[in-house]
Image: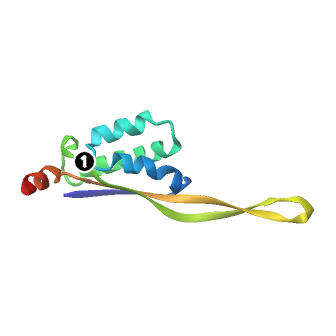
Amino acid sequence: MEVIAVTKFVRLSPLKSRDLTRAIQGRPVAEALSMTEASKRKAAREIQKTLKSAIANAENNAKLSADKLYVKEAVIEQGPSLKRFWPRSRGMVSPIRKKLSHVRIVLSDERKARAQARG
């Protein structure tokens, strides 16, 4: 069974945060949580919040045990950009785009069933 948690409109650049989500994909939930706790990046804090939300969804809504879950998919999607402007010389301006992201984490408990079916 799959459980999904989404955090939208996070003030986070998608390019700077995708490497951490790629690192936690396919790992058990406990290991993924320890990886996000060990990282000092702002992205790690937001991914950790979404991961904890997904774990709570799995335990409360789907009645699954957190020990048997693994991260099936972790994605940082591009959100809208806030458009701001910075004054320059001679009355000109330079555009600044403050990027937003959507964090989506999918947890599953079917990892071992697939491995047994293959082998």
- 81 shown above or below 10: below
The image shows residue 7 at horizontal and vertical percentages of 44, 56
Q: Residue drawn at (28%, 43%), measured in percent from left and top?
A: 29
- 51 shown above or below 73: above
- Decide which of 72, 102 is in the foreground and name it: 72
Residue 8 visible in the shown view: no
Q: Which residue in the rendered view is the most extreme toward the right?
A: 90
What residue is disc 1 on?
Answer: 70
The image shows residue 82 at horizontal and vertical percentages of 64, 63
Q: Residue drawn at (51%, 56%), measured in percent from left and top?
A: 14
The image shows residue 55 at horizontal and vertical percentages of 29, 47
Q: Residue drawn at (28%, 38%), measured in percent from left and top?
A: 30
Q: Residue drawn at (52%, 64%), measured in percent from left and top?
A: 79
Residue 76 visible in the shown view: yes
Q: Which residue in the rendered view is the most extreme toward the front?
A: 119
* Residue neighbourhood size for the residue with mark 1, other residues' Cα within 10 Å, grouped as few (<14), some (14–19), many (≥20): many
Q: Quadrant of residue 73?
A: bottom left
Secondary structure of the residue carrying tag 1 is strand
- For the N terminus, the quadrant is bottom left
